[in-house]
């Protein structure tokens, strides 16, 4: 029974993450876009899907992946997420450098651009903090609240960025994916007690 439950959980997760990709792949808006722009767009969609996976892996929620193994996969998915962000921004740069420059300098006329740039830099900061954790010798009381806080900012900015864009992703599938990311991240933060460690340090 537990094995069947695990299979069903994986199938449900795969369906939820695949739905926005399928909707985007069948969007009529793709007819007016070049291959590089399309690839950049799908990199962004996959990046949002990766943000659903990350808290599930970190907290050990996924069947068949014990916490230790889940955290190893979490690190790999984190690297993939950074690469997807680079592909997303890089593809947009190739197709329209002025738009990317305006976004990076916060002078873009489109509100979603600024949110995307903030999400990009905070995602890079979260990855950099993770890679330098051992070198900086950060204790769990500093590491977990710090990393979790940066991730929370990244998630909020990413969701605002995605919701404001009227692109190939359907509104229903996009909102579902964003909602899953919020629920997964919120539950993981509560279970991992990231903020409790910081409060305990202050009490000491």
Image: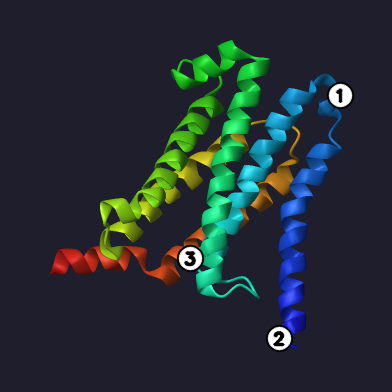
Q: Nearer the viewer, residue 138 or 7?
A: 138
Q: Is residue 136 left or right of residue 93?
A: left
Residue occupied by mark 1: 31
**Residue 45 is drawn in which quadrant?**
top right
Residue found farthest to the left: 204
Q: State the residue at coordinates (62%, 31%).
A: 88
Q: State the residue at coordinates (49%, 32%).
A: 115
Residue 6 seen in render = yes
Give the mark toward the camera: 3 or 2. 2
Residue 2 - label? 2
Give the CA distance from mark 1 to mark 2: 45 Å
In x, y percent, where is residue 66?
A: 56, 75
Give the CA distance from mark 3 to mark 2: 22 Å
Q: Residues within 10 Å of mark 3 (few under 14, many from 20)?
A: many
Residue 20 - label? none
Quadrant location, the N terminus? bottom right
In the rendered view, tell whether residue 7 sits above or below residue 97.
Answer: below
**Residue 189 is drawn in which quadrant?**
bottom left
Identify the secondary structure beneath mark 2.
helix
In the rendered view, tell whether residue 50 sits above or below residue 184.
Answer: above
Residue occupied by mark 3: 188
Q: Is residue 126 left or right of residue 34?
A: left
Identify the secondary structure beneath mark 1.
helix
Q: State the residue at coordinates (74%, 38%).
A: 169
Residue 184 seen in render = no
Give the CA distance from mark 1 to mark 3: 39 Å
């Amino acid at each position: 029974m537990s094995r069947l439950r695990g299979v069903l959980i994986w199938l449900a997760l795969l369906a939820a993450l695949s739905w926005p990709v399928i909707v985007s792949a069948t969007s009529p808006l793709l007819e007016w876009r070049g291959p590089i722009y399309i690839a950049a767009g799908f990199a962004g969609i996959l990046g949002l899907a990766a943000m659903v996976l990350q808290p599930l892996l970190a907290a050990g929620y996924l069947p068949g992946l014990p916490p230790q193994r889940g955290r190893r996969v979490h690190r790999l998915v984190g690297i993939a997420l950074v690469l997807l962000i680079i592909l997303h921004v890089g593809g947009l740069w190739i197709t329209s450098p002025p738009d990317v420059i305006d976004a990076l300098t916060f002078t873009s006329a489109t509100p979603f651009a600024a949110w995307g740039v903030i999400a990009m830099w905070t995602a890079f900061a979260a990855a950099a903090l993770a890679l330098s954790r051992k070198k900086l010798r950060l204790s769990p009381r500093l590491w977990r609240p710090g990393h979790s806080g940066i991730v929370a900012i990244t998630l909020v900015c990413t969701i605002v960025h995605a919701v404001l864009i009227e692109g190939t992703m359907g509104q229903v599938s996009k909102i579902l994916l964003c909602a899953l990311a919020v629920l997964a991240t919120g539950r993981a933060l509560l279970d991992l007690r990231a903020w409790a460690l910081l409060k305990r340090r202050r009490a000491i």
